[in-house]
Image (cartoon, grey):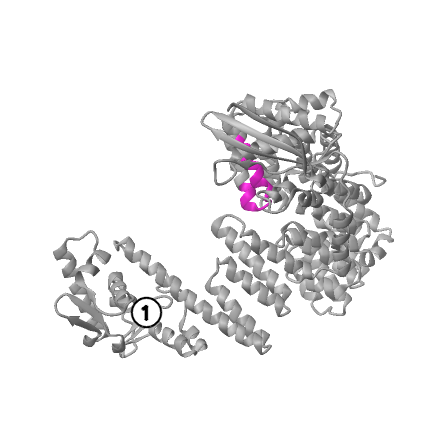
């Protein structure tokens, strides 16, 4: 008996078991066979109804000849009795004439033999199958059938999972639940159900891994984040694993949040009359934020944090508590032909009471937009009784460009850059270049281009020589256009830091902060550079300030977590790392810092579990080194030689030196550390602040002076007393 396999890639075998390649060479033959076999209700089909499905562009005679030819090939392959005629106009297929996986799949489901049915389901019905020139009606029918069979298989897998869970066979339950998710790789509901089962059966780590894998797959396929409900579920699962002390910390913060005087959050503006916010709306929102952050008397929440509340589901008092602010500004933007309306409301958050509101209706020009933003900023400053200096008034009233399109392109670039992914950064570069091509005198796109190029290097997505020359040209042009612009000075500092010119970077960051005290990224980057140069206490103060302004930024929270580590406050470091994991579960730096903090608390097994196989591109071998030290500390030193060879093959003499120190081989450690040429981020952080039990004995040795001198000089510090 011939065999037909169509649940997955198509395959037909004759009575001898050999593949029938010739039949599959004509895709319409298989399409007609499948339609006759599966179309419901089962039975006879009129030829006149079949013709337009498969030959919509052919004439009646030509189509009938083609149909007769197809039926001949089906009989020849599956047997003469496979096709039944009723008169001259009706045809049907006799499923009993051959074996088919799709028929037996449905029969096994009906009989309750679910495992046997799922063995037959190798994948989507006719996976990868395409029929040229078929009608849209046939394509629609085939899509529906694919969905129907996938749903049947998924339901069968879930029934097996639930049956296993009822008898506490969690291994089998998880196996079938994963099978259901695998059948639906982009279905958020199926993955939510899998995550819930894994969590319920004690596999919290597996549940979060499922989310991270789904997040990456969904983002790559659809170029956006998965539905917020799935992200919320991941955060809830993550929070269940938090330590009791951290949960108390969350509850305490929620109950005792102090709203700083003059603190304000500007929520993302809504675009009226459209399905989603436009670039112009985002540009207006971002510009008002920037103008407000120039006022020293105000504490303005950074854009990255407030963007978490686009289309908020929570009430304003709840949002204000989460951001730690006293005031909230919300608004809408509506475009109508050549005019624009901007409406805003200032609300005292804890009372949920509006204290000021205004609506601006003007011709849509760049000058009018900047005037609207200036008026709004001035009104808010007055309402919050903030004193404005002459310099602050000038910054508030500043016009940036007369080209609206350039203005919007810059806003799109900033949004993409905020994602801190390689795709987002490269997309931002394209937007900034488009903005510059429209207005070469607009300073902010030059700043954005500089930042994006350097961050490609900072996050390990590009080599320095590939981006530094272009970044240098961009920042020089930015400085020519705006030497007193805070963003320009911060970008110069960022370039200095990337080139390991530490003192020059710190000086420029401080200039940027002096020009704009509420500049969250400047505080954040200053904290990072201070860490690299060995100034742990100064780094902590800058990190705290960055988080005050930008409380939901994973990057700012990361630097705060690191600052707590370098200041010896390991439990606080873990709390901040877990806050990041709660906000963005796939931010691997948070897992890294938690592992490092656990190591420094002598919780070596927990640190090893956290760090094993962890990849953090910017940190290089940092996770592997810390994992190796954890393993040595719990007595598992058998892998040390293998790891040492790996470090040696990669010419990572720093990690070699620290690992030798961990093994108690002091002289070998110094021989390796004295050869370090690349004092990268993790190397210089470690030599200044980390691994006290391992590096402590080395720090007391006179030879350490030269090692520290080499590390500092590589970052532009030539005086060891600084």
Quick one: 469 or 556, which is closer to the camera? 556
Q: Position of residue 135 (x, y in %)?
A: 26, 54
Identify the residue shown where x is 49% and y is 30%: 335
Residue 220 on the magenta span: no
Residue receiving disc 1: 11
Identify the residue shown where x is 68% and y is 33%: 490
Q: Quadrant of residue 111?
A: bottom left
Quick one: 58 or 699, which is closer to the camera? 58
| Secondary structure, magenta segment, majority class | helix
Quick one: 391 or 113, which is closer to the camera? 113
Q: Position of residue 544 (x, y in %)?
A: 76, 43
Quadrant containing the N terminus in the rendered view:
bottom left
Identify the residue shown where x is 58% and y is 42%: 310
Q: Tag 1, which secondary structure?
A: strand
Q: Is residue 57 visible?
A: yes
Q: Position of residue 713 (x, y in %)?
A: 76, 41
Q: Quadrant of residue 447?
A: top right
Callout 1 environment at 10 Å: few (<14), some (14 to 19), or many (20+)?
Answer: some
561 lies above or below 13 = above
Residue 422 on the magenta span: yes
Quadrant containing the C terminus in the rendered view:
top right
178 lies above or below 221 = below
Per the rendered image, the range of residues in magenta is 408-426
Q: Is residue 652 visible?
A: no
Q: How many marks?
A: 1
Q: Position of residue 653 (x, y in %)?
A: 71, 54
């Amino acid at each position: 008996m011939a065999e037909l396999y169509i649940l997955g890639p198509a395959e037909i075998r004759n009575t001898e078991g050999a593949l029938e390649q010739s039949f599959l060479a004509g895709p319409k033959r298989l399409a007609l066979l499948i339609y006759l076999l599966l179309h419901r209700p089962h039975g006879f089909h009129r030829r006149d109804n079949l013709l337009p499905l498969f030959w919509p562009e052919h004439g009646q005679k030509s189509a009938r000849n083609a149909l007769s030819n197809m039926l001949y090939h089906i009989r020849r392959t599956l047997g003469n009795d496979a096709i039944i005629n009723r008169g001259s106009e009706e045809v049907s297929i006799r499923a009993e004439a051959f074996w088919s996986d799709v028929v037996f799949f449905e029969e096994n489901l009906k009989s309750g033999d679910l495992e046997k049915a799922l063995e037959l389901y190798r994948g989507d019905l006719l996976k990868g199958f395409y029929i040229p020139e078929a009608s849209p009606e046939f394509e629609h029918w085939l899509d529906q059938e694919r969905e129907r069979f996938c749903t049947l298989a998924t339901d069968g897998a879930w029934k097996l999972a639930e049956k296993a869970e009822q008898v506490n066979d969690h291994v089998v339950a998880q196996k079938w639940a994963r099978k259901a998710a695998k059948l639906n790789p982009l279905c958020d509901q199926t993955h939510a159900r899998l995550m819930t089962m894994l969590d319920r059966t004690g596999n919290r780590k597996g549940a979060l891994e499922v989310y991270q894998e789904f997040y990456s797959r969904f983002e790559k396929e659809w170029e956006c984040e998965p539905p917020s409900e799935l992200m919320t579920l991941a955060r809830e699962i993550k929070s269940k694993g938090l330590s009791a002390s951290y949960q108390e910390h969350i509850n305490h913060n929620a109950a005792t949040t102090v709203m700083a005087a003059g603190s304000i959050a500007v929520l993302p503006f809504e675009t009226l009359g459209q399905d989603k916010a436009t670039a112009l709306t985002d540009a207006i929102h971002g510009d008002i934020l920037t103008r407000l952050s120039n006022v020293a008397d105000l504490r303005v929440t950074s854009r990255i944090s407030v963007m978490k509340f686009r289309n908020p589901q929570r009430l304003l008092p709840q949002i204000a508590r989460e951001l730690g602010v006293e005031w909230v500004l919300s608004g809408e933007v509506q475009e109508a032909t050549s005019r624009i309306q901007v409406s805003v409301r200032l609300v005292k958050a804890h009372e949920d009471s509006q204290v000021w509101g205004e609506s601006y209706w003007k011709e849509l020009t760049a000058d009018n937009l900047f005037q609207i933003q200036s008026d709004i900023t001035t009104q808010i400053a007055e309402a919050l009784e903030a004193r404005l200096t002459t310099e602050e008034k000038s910054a508030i009233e500043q016009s940036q460009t007369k080209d609206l399109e350039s203005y919007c392109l810059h806003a799109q670039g900033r949004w993409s850059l905020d994602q801190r992914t390689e795709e987002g950064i490269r997309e931002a570069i394209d937007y900034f270049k488009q903005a510059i091509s429209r207005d070469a005198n607009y300073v902010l796109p030059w700043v954005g281009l500089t930042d994006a190029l350097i961050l490609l290097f900072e996050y390990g997505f590009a080599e320095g020589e590939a981006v530094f020359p272009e970044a240098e040209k961009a920042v020089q042009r930015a400085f020519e256009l705006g030497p007193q612009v805070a963003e320009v000075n911060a970008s110069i500092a960022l370039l200095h830091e990337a080139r390991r010119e530490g003192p020059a970077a710190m000086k420029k960051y401080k200039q940027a902060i002096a020009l704009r005290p509420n500049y969250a990224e400047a505080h954040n980057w200053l904290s990072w550079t201070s860490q690299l140069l060995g100034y742990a206490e100064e780094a902590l103060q800058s990190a705290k300030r960055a988080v005050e302004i930008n409380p939901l930024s994973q990057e700012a929270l990361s630097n705060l977590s690191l600052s707590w580590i370098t200041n010896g406050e390991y439990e606080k470091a873990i709390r901040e790392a877990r806050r990041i994991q709660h906000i963005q579960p796939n931010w691997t730096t948070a897992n890294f810092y938690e592992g490092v903090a656990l190591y420094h608390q002598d919780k070596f097994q927990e640190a090893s579990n956290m760090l094993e196989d962890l990849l953090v591109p910017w940190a290089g071998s940092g996770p592997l080194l810390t994992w190796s030290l954890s393993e040595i500390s719990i007595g598992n030193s058998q892998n040390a030689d293998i790891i040492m060879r790996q470090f040696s093959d990669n010419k990572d003499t720093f990690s070699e030196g620290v690992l030798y120190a961990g093994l108690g081989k002091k002289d070998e450690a110094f021989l390796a550390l004295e050869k370090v040429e690349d004092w990268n981020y993790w190397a210089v952080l470690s030599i200044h602040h980390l691994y006290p039990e391992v590096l402590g004995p080395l720090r007391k040795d006179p030879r350490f002076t030269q090692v520290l001198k080499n590390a500092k000089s590589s970052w532009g510090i030539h005086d060891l007393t600084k």
